[in-house]
Amino acid sequence: MKPLQSKSERGNAMLEFALGWSILWMVFSGLYQIGYAYYLYNVMLESTSNAAALGSRLAFDTGNTSAFTTTLKNMVLYGDETAGAKTLVPNLTASNVNVNYHPDANGMPRYITVNITGYTINALFTSFTLPNKPGATTKYYGQINCSGC
């Protein structure tokens, strides 16, 4: 025979489910948010590393440095030397990508630095702003053309 439930016990299962589900939902959405932020950071880290590696071998023309920086920015944004239709990371623009070359005494590049500045990762509930991260620096081994000399 089934024992009778008192009126105070009715709805306990519904209340426990609601509390349990809300806690689980917060935990899962927090994990998603952190995972998504790490994923985007990893994509940007890999693209800046690839751009720096390309920049270390790419021919550098002292008369047209903008072509060099544009090529490296395209590598960060699209994963290719030429501009594409869709960026690797949502809302990443060329203004977020910095390409610097550190010249020696003769004005020729010795090191190439590629980094991302001011990019904000819009996750599920919050945003993460990355100040000067990620980035990569490599030594320059490429050919130098002096068309402006």
Image (spheres, rainbow, N blue to C red):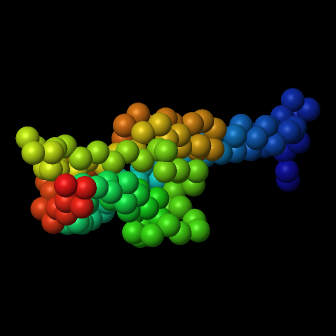
In the rendered view, would you say 47 is above or below 11?
Answer: below
- Which residue occupies the foreground of this view, 24 or 63? 63
| Residue 67 percent coordinates (x, y) | 37, 60
Taking depth in this image into account, of 145 and 130 the one nearest to the observer is 145
Question: Which residue reaches farthest top?
Answer: 8
Please name whichever residue, 60 or 39, is drawn nearer the observer in this view of the structure.
Answer: 60
- At a point 88% along the width and 42% down the height, the residue shown is 4
The residue lying at 15 percent from left, 57 percent from top is 140
Q: Is residue 133 visible?
A: yes
Nearer-the-camera pick, 38 or 132: 132
Give the tally of numbered discs.
Answer: 0
| Residue 68 position (above or below residue 99) | below
- For the question of whether residue 32 can be seen, the reply is no
Residue 118 horizontal side relative to residue 98, left or right: right
Q: Position of residue 46 (x, y in %)?
A: 34, 59
Q: Which x, y percent locates residue 32?
A: 55, 50
Q: Position of residue 57 (x, y in %)?
A: 20, 66
Position above or below: 87 against 29: below
Instruction: Specify whether 26 is left or right of 36.
Output: right
Quarter occupied by the C terminus: bottom left
Outermost residue toward the front in this view: 149
Q: Residue at x 15, y 50 (%)?
A: 108
Using the rendered view, name the quadrant where residue 13 is placed: top right
**Image height of 8 relative to 21, above or below:** above
Where on the picture, by quarter, is residue 30? Answer: top right
